Amino acid sequence: MVSQLSRPSEPGERLCSDAEIIGVSLREPSSFATLFDRHAEEIARYVSARVGPDLADDVTAETFLAAFRHRDRYDMDRPDARPWLYGIAIHQIASHRRAEARYRKLTASALPDTDTHDFGDRAVERVTAEQLRPVLAGVLEKLRRQDRELLLLVAWAGLSYDECAQALGLTVSAVKSRLNRIRVRTREALGGANPMNEEETPWMS
């Protein structure tokens, strides 16, 4: 069954949903590896952005191990397991909270190598981004933990409101309300607008 789930699909062939894979894994545990193959890279990128590359592999592995152990609790009406996996990853990251805090401070203060001969728009945008980074880091630090998780799921993972609601165990209306509160605080921290772009990012609109 694992080979059938994992092999590339023929033209027009329907891929098994994540829910179907999890359902099969209840009978054949080895088939859960297909879920890992599908989503581990995406989850690892998010985890790496949160706790740094040194811990990313361990936290990602912990995430999928926890998902495997609790797969019998998965809501089979949800074909896409990514919000569920992000929710588990958030819990795993919480156990490494000190490491995450250190990494946020490091990325907020670190300056990349700058080409002094590049005086174009990209150089200006890079300098502006570096100036804003400590401000945004300060905003994140002041947010309540669940608000911070929501902001990062939208801004870094690109989840929809519904997917964020699934990941955090909230209603969609609660997600919208929290994001509105975050927008207000972020705009205040940035002087009322996002100075990096003429068009605001989707989560700030």
Image (cartoon, rainbow, N blue to C red):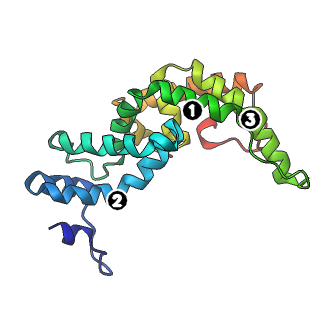
Left of 78 or right of it: where is 199?
right
Q: Which residue matches tag 2?
A: 38
Q: Amino acid at mark 1?
A: Tyr
Residue where numbered disc 1 is placed: 103
Q: Residues within 10 Å of mark 1 (few under 14, many from 20)?
A: some
Q: Could you tell me if residue 92 is visible in this image?
A: yes
Hey, which quadrant is residue 128 in on the image? Answer: top right
Q: CA distance from mark 3 to mark 2?
A: 35 Å
Between 55 and 90, the one nearer to me in the picture:
55
Residue 141: give x, y in percent of width and height: 58, 21
Query: CA separation, marks 2 and 1?
Result: 27 Å
Count residues near mark 3 (Cα–Cα under 10 Å), then give few for <14, some for 14-19, many for 20+. some
**Residue type, mark 3 in image:** Asn
Q: Nearer the viewer, mark 3 or mark 1?
A: 1
Answer few, some or many: residues within 10 Å of disc 2's Cα (few below 14, many 20 plus, some between 14 and 19): few
Q: Position of residue 80 (x, y in %)?
A: 32, 52
Dots 2, 1 in contact, CB < 8 A: no
Q: Position of residue 195 (x, y in %)?
A: 79, 36
Q: Residue at x 74, y 35 (%)?
A: 194
Is 1 placed above or below 137 here? below
